[in-house]
Image: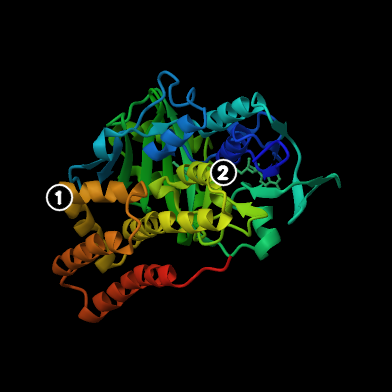
Amino acid sequence: MSKKTKIIVVGAGPAGCAVARAYALAGCSVVLLEAEPEGKSHKRFAGEWLHPQGVEALQQLGFESIPSTQGRPRGRGFVVYPGHGESPVKLDYVEGQRGLAFHHGDLVDEMRQVLAQTDGVNFRFGVRVVSVDDGGVFLENGERLEADRVVGADGRSSVVRRSLRGASPHKAMSAMTGILLEGVKAPYPDYGHVFLGKPSFLLGYEIAPSVVRICVDVPLKYKTEMKDPEWLITAIRETLPPVWRQPCEEQIRAGHLRWQANHFLARADYGNGRRVLIGDAAGHTHPLTATGITNGLVDAIQLVQNKDFRVFARNRRRACRVPELLSRALYDCFSKEDAFSNSLRRAVVSLWRNDERERDRTMGLLMGNGRSFFSFAGPFLKALFGAWQGRDQSTTMRADLASIASWIRLPMAYAMAGWVRPKS
Ligand SMILES: Cc1cc2nc3c(=O)[nH]c(=O)nc-3n(C[C@H](O)[C@H](O)[C@H](O)COP(=O)(O)OP(=O)(O)OC[C@H]3O[C@@H](n4cnc5c(N)ncnc54)[C@H](O)[C@@H]3O)c2cc1C
């Protein structure tokens, strides 16, 4: 690739900044187009936890000042609180690797600052792309820009994706609200916390020393109730650790909440080579497993490294399939309320509590270390068997079998998708 290769990147979120930087380092001429005016990124409630693979990607792209910022928490893994007063279970990243936690707006601002000083990048803020074709893009003001490749890093409502496939078929999963607590500590400051309980589960982690982000997942069936602050306070009170209750209630009553909808779109389609999709534009899942930003950064590096677009698309489809399946299965396991799913939740926690290999395996899968469907299927069947043995005897066999059937449907769909060639 040379300066003659012209690349347009739509969107300067984490994935767009990463791919613009990677192309510029490879010697291309890059136009990076961002709809937001400068300085607006702090308003967003989005990803604030990066897996070790994502930290490595930042370093590889020359964003090393971001992970090395003093005081920025380096996560060791996750602590799962099963509820009912049971002690928590720790899941550590394998081989002592470390993730990273931060304020989303800080990450995006810091990446954008690096881009503004990167040779070969023409960074334009406050310009919205309204249509895209194989030769370039049209901006809101009618301006036409042409390029050899347009990279859609424009998030979940991607205009680049729409230009290729029409309206996105992504599926709403839940709503999530973010609450920021200042001057409090997390029980395990180096870990992300998952509290199982009501209304489904809460996530909590320090994004700076003594600054805790809490994310409350609210199933869509509560979409009317969730607008009432008193309902929210009551719904999460028992699930929150006692030290966070009062500050959390104060923030909710003061209306200091940021809401986001969570959607699912399988990562099966990366575009056609002239118009390429990366990051959330390529696919997205529930934030429970915190894979979105890491995926976007790795997409960026691999797109630029692979001369052949088809090899890039095939590799990314393969690498993301098992983490995506794990994310969906864990979300269902932590949020479904029927008796068999409760039993499955207990079985999964017990598997993690009693077996170090299973803990390592789960964390490895999360980080994309298992590409084969069987790396997921083995532990999944073990958990299913444990759930069957420990199921609540007051429910009917028929109800349990129906629940098992619904649990098997998802991995089967993924196994089939692995054998069926996706459209390119
Ligand atoms: C509540 C919540 C919590 C999350 N937690 C985590 C987490 O802990 N860890 C994690 O890894 N992920 C998490 N995620 C997911 C993560 O935020 C996303 O995966 C990530 O932000 C995607 O990055 P991206 O660059 O692909 O897209 P985005 O971050 O959405 O950036 C897209 C950019 O494109 C711009 N844009 C859009 N349309 C246009 C247009 N037409 N023209 C020009 N510019 C345009 C937008 O303004 C934006 O700046 C979370 C998501 C949510 C909602």
Amino acid type at mark 2: Val
For label 1, the residue is: 355
Residue 117 in the image: state x and y as whole percent. 65, 23
Instruction: Work out whether 394 lies above or below 207.
Output: below
User: N-terminal of the two: label 2 or label 1?
Assistant: 2
Seen from the viewer's position, the closer of residues 403 and 26 is 26
Q: Quadrant of residue 51?
A: top left
Q: Quadrant of residue 185?
A: top left
- Secondary structure of the residue carrying tag 2 is helix
Q: Would residue 51 be seen by someone viewing this image from the given angle?
A: no
The residue positioned 64% from the left and 57% from the top of the image is: 161
Q: What is the residue that sits farthest to the top in this orientation?
A: 70
Amino acid type at mark 1: Asp
Ligand 1 quadrant assignment: top right
Callout count: 2
Instruction: Work out whether 315 lies above or below 16.
Output: below
**Which callout, 2 or 1, points to the residue nearer the camera?**
2
Instruction: Work out whether 133 lies above or below 420.
Output: above
Label 2 Cα crowd, 10 Å radius (few <14 / some 14-19 / many 20+): many
For label 2, the residue is: 304
Q: Which mark is residue 184?
A: none
Q: Classify mark 2 as within 8 Å of ligand 1 or not, answering yes or no.
A: no
Q: Is residue 172 left or right of residue 29?
A: left
The residue positioned 28% from the left and 73% from the top of the image is: 404
- Secondary structure of the residue carrying tag 1 is loop
Instruction: Specify how the rendered protein is coloured.
Output: rainbow
Residue 2 in the image: state x and y as whole percent. 67, 38
Tag 2–tag 1 contact (CB < 8 Å): no
